[in-house]
Amino acid sequence: MNDILFGNNNGKVLKKIAGRSLKSGKNHIAVLAIMLSTLLFTSLFTIAISLQSSIQDNEMRTVGTSAHANAKLITENEYEDLISDDRITEYGKSVVFGYAVGDCFNKLPTEVRYADENYARWGFRSPTRGSLPQAENEMAASQIVLDAMGLSNAEVGTQIELTFSTDTQTITENFILSGIWPGDTVTPSQMILLACGTGRGQSRQEIHAGSRSAAGLGR
């Protein structure tokens, strides 16, 4: 192109500038494409991990425990043999007393049992208010159980009458509520926890055991 005033030909310069501009634009597009691809793969990876974790959590909730091993209906001697294995670094213990009795439990099967801290934690039954029962006249329950009993407003310290059946008898006693946790409707059954050494224990015991990479880590 000839300059009108000075008669200069700027065509080559303009072509060079235009070429550089196009190359720069292509580089920007390439960088943007790489960034978008990276973001896409990162998002897909994050979604896949979250989905896998959600599936695992749902399976553990359905089974009722996050431990890797679950031994049921074993004797005290079998229990001692089990926990003496050097590969087991942490374990939880539960003793089944019986089942809650009453119209409110007809559609809500509820076990009455003892559970130590590990068993309660791995079974998603650690009290979020109060604590696990320590005294013989204490009990802990989920909010789901309390709602079914018509005790939606119950607080730690509330006195509750509970009837439950064992293998040999039906027992009705008054307990002081020591702990409450939200509860989960997908678990096989609800639970009411009592203290150990109450004299109500049957021969049935349930133990959760696992290596440090499993139950020892909680999940």
Image (cartoon, helix red, strand yellow):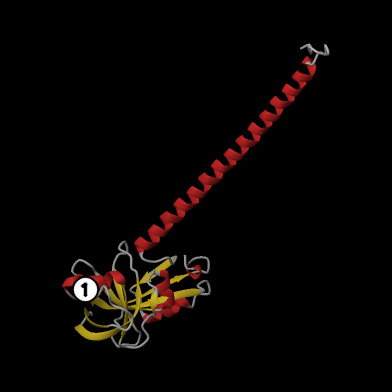
Specify whether residue 143 is in view. Answer: yes
SS assignment at label 1: loop
Q: Nearer the viewer, residue 179 or 51?
A: 179
Residue 187, picture quadrant:
bottom left
Q: Is residue 211 left or right of residue 21?
A: left
Residue type at mark 1 is Gly
In screen coordinates, is 47 left or right of 103?
right
Residue 110 seen in render: no
Image coordinates for residue 47, horizontal then vertical, percent: 48, 48
- From the viewer's side, name the closer residue of 142 and 121: 142
Across and down, in percent, residue 67 comes to 43, 67
Would you place residue 6 above or below residue 76 in this image? above
Residue 1 in which image quadrant: top right
The residue that label 1 is drawn on is 150
Q: Residue at x 36, y 83 (%)?
A: 133
The quarter of the picture where residue 16 lies is top right
- Going by the picture, which residue comes out furthest to the left? 103
Disc 1: CA contacts within 10 A as few (<14), some (14-19) or many (>=20): few
The relative height of residue 32 versus residue 44 in the rendered view (above or below) is: above
Q: Please indicate whether residue 86 sits to the left or right of residue 103 in the image.
A: right
Please name whichever residue, 81 or 163, is drawn nearer the observer in this view of the structure. 163
Residue 160 point in image, percent of width and height:
25, 82
